[in-house]
Amino acid sequence: MTVLIKGGTVVNADRTFRADVLCQDGVIAAIGDDLETPAGATVVDAGGQYVMPGGIDPHTHMQLPFMGTVASEDFYTGTAAGLAGGTTMIIDFAIPNPQQNILETYQQWREWAEKAVADYSFHVAITWWDESVYKDMGTLVEKHGVNSFKHFMAYKGAIMADDEILVNSFSRALELGAIPTVHAENGELVFRLQQEIYDKGIRGPEGHPLSRPPEVEGEAANRAIRIAEVLNTPLYVVHTSCRQALEAITRARGEGQRVFGEVLAGHLLIDDSVYRDPDFEAAAAHVMSPPFRSKEHQEALWHGLQSGNLQTTATDHCCFCADQKAAGKDDFRLIPNGTAGIENRLEALWHHGVGTGRLTMNEFVRVTSTNAAQIFNIYPRKGSVSVGADADVVVWDPEASKTISAKTHFQKIDYNIFEGMTVKGCASHTISRGKLVYKDGKLDVERGAGRYVDRPPYAPYYDALKLKAEKNAPVAVKRQ
């Protein structure tokens, strides 16, 4: 398919300019003024609109088996919903159970993702450790294009990675040129607080944020950062939700440490009052970890995004419907953790970021696409409207408006955390690998059209880090 986007204004992370964009054979073939229309091309009139790289959501969980159920959104419906909102690639998580072979887990997720309609890649979680994990991490990096490994510092008794696992896995990641990522919550403290709060008779969703206060996240973020500092390993902190975790990231970056921070659109826009809704379904719908925080944390997170101490925005898209959330009707600890957002991330951030002056258009592109592509080593193939890049493009109408609702969204879930929010600025067209897949509210997707994206290891930067780590290694003292 050939698509010519005419008359728009191209917005990249580094500059803005007027140009036509020609997409052919899945890539951007030409960018320039008054490009000639090839025979048979589909023409998109982008007059008065912006032409931007498609969004990259670096944190999703499609059809995740979790807490006794499976997320309602699969790779087909989830990536389709993303395209409707201008997101053209996801990085999902392959999560093994303790003692489960990580290569087998990765292959299982690859099979599930074959139905995706947009491009995808995977972080692989390290939930246990032995020599087989050490070896298989190498295979994933060298043969399967995985360059990031996830560590859950929470969920004791399930997938929690203790300090020993962190040290072993971070060290191995450095050897391979891969980047460790962490879900930063102190699992021991969460486990204890959950029991204490339950024993006090607090059983509803309001107990969820009480059991995971900001200090729990701040401690874990700082601990992971300092472990990475000792090992001389870069680190990516997912879904930063509070001032304490942001301060740990900011401090480390100020000291010259290579630490990246991710923030969810939900954590920027929703506060913890949702957990006090007397309607169980409404409150439980917002149960996720880390939980939504008070407004003071939201303001701090916006400042982190504006200052560059938080580099990426994501959704942690993990859908559980009301009947699934009902498993925790009498015990907040049993409510499946997860909310949606892949369809609405870009429009919510545009409205509340660009629309309020918090972000420029170029900064918007940076935090919704380009930074993720650069951090995970797929730039400029992704995250850029440039010749030779994959033709993943969103045409953005700054004057279009809509009211977000579960009644009209494409996401496979029966509620929306942004329900009733009116936003100005929406995708009018989405092009995925050169095919026009979304136009004026209608999807035209092909099951299985999405492709797996290899992400090569980081070099030669990592070679320098490894050399530095060797030089800084402690020297044994020989005793007489």
Image: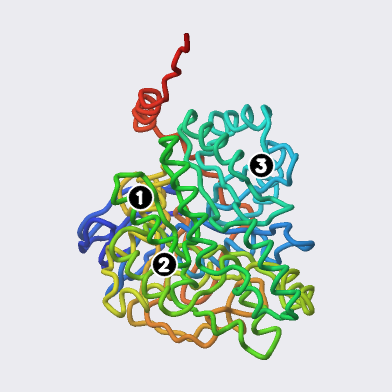
Q: Amino acid at mark 3?
A: Tyr
Q: Which residue is mark 3?
A: 106
Q: Quadrant of residue 350?
A: bottom left
How far across and how far down the image is residue 386, in percent? Answer: 30, 50
In percent of the image, x 53 and y 74: which residue is there? 292
Query: CA separation, marks 2 and 1?
Result: 14 Å
With 346 as the anchor, is 335 left or right in this view?
Answer: right
Marks 3 and 2: in contact by CB < 8 Å? no
- Position of residue 388 in the picture relative to residue 323 (left or right): left
| Image location (x, y in percent) of residue 8 | 27, 67
> Which residue was labeled with disc 2?
243
Nearer the observer: mark 2 or 3; the answer is: 2
Which picture quadrant has residue 280?
bottom right
- Residue type for callout 1: Ala
Chain-order first, disc 2 or disc 1? 2
Within 10 Å of the Cα at label 1, are there few (<14), some (14-19), or many (20+) other Cα atoms?
some
For mark 1, what is the residue? 252
Circle 1 sits in a helix, a strand or a loop, which is it? helix
